[in-house]
């Protein structure tokens, strides 16, 4: 029998065992939570659970404004919108909007064939968040001139729609916050 202080030699294989478990090596062993391999195995599933809970919370708290319940009715209504835009072309309606961010005002110069309306409706439509859409009724300040308050809008690109509810025309265009103005329709 071999002495326990000598290394164990496996006969004929040329392999020598140099480390043995002893009570002193158990005292120097790391606790389980200090092992890096444990954390490499536990971290990805734990991170997936945390990210999943975060995404679930965001999904519950936000509105999915892109999905409409009555998509068929909205699809049919597009013909009415196109008719209103064609009517604006026939009347040669042209509008120049200018924005004054310091005073939070919008000014509109309207040029068209026929009578000038008493009021027009100006809509700021956010491309993805319907909850941020704004509607402003602009009243006449002079012949062909309109003015009204403008709400604070999130920075970015906005769809601007100008409508006359009485005459039934509609103009639309795009505007970026920070720009001084936008022109809608064909200039006369």
Image (spheres, helix red, strand yellow):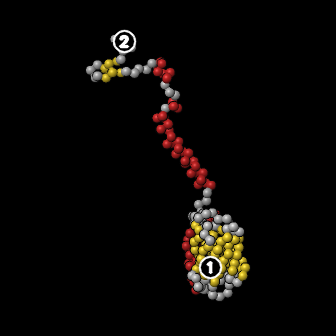
Choose between 128 and 157: the one closer to the eye.
Answer: 157
Mark 1 Cα within 10 Å, few/some/many (few <14, many 20+)? many
Asked if residue 1 shows in the view, the reply is yes
Choose between 75 and 141: the one closer to the eye.
Answer: 141
Displayed quadrant of residue 95: bottom right
The answer to whether residue 103 is above or below residue 111 is: above
Quick one: quadrant of the C terminus? Answer: bottom right
* Residue at left offset 59%, top offset 77%: 184
- Asked if the residues shown at circle 2 and circle 1 are in contact, with their CB atoms under 8 angstroms apart, the answer is no
**SS for callout 2:** loop
The answer to whether residue 150 is above or below residue 141 is: above
Choose between 130 and 25: the one closer to the eye.
Answer: 25
Displayed quadrant of residue 180: bottom right
* Residue at left offset 26%, top offset 20%: 12
Mark 2 Cα within 10 Å, few/some/many (few <14, many 20+)? few
Viewer-nearest of discs 2 and 1: 1
* Residue at left offset 56%, top offset 79%: 82
**SS for callout 1:** strand
Quick one: quadrant of the N terminus? Answer: top left
Label 2 and label 1: CA atoms lie apart by 103 Å
Instruction: Check the image and name the residue furthest to the bottom.
Output: 114
| Percent position of residue 146, x then y | 69, 78
Question: Which residue corresponds to mark 1?
Answer: 95
| Percent position of residue 62, x then y | 61, 57
Asked if residue 77 shows in the view, the reply is no
Choose between 7 and 179: the one closer to the eye.
Answer: 179
Q: Is residue 89 left or right of residue 107?
A: left
Marks counted in the figure total 2
Label ID, residue 3: 2
Label ID, residue 116: none
| Percent position of residue 136, x then y | 68, 72
């Amino acid at each position: 029998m071999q002495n326990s202080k000598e290394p164990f030699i496996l006969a004929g294989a040329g392999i020598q065992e140099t480390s043995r478990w002893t009570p002193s090596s158990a005292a120097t062993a790391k606790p389980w939570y200090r092992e890096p391999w444990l954390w490499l195995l536990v971290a990805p599933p734990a991170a997936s659970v945390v990210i999943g809970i975060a995404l679930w919370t965001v999904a519950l708290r936000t509105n999915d404004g892109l999905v409409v319940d009555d998509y068929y009715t909205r699809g049919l209504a597009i013909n009415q919108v196109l008719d209103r835009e064609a009517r604006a072309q026939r009347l040669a309606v042209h509008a120049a909007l200018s924005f004054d961010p310091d005073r939070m005002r919008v000014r509109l110069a309207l040029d068209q064939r026929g009578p000038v309306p008493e009021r027009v409706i100006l809509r700021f439509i956010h491309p993805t968040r319907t909850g941020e859409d704004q509607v402003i009724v602009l009243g006449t300040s002079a012949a062909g001139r309109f003015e009204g308050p403008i709400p604070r809008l999130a920075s970015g690109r906005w769809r601007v729609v100008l409508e006359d509810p009485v005459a039934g025309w509609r103009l639309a265009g795009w505007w970026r916050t920070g720009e001084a103005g936008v022109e809608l329709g064909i200039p006369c």
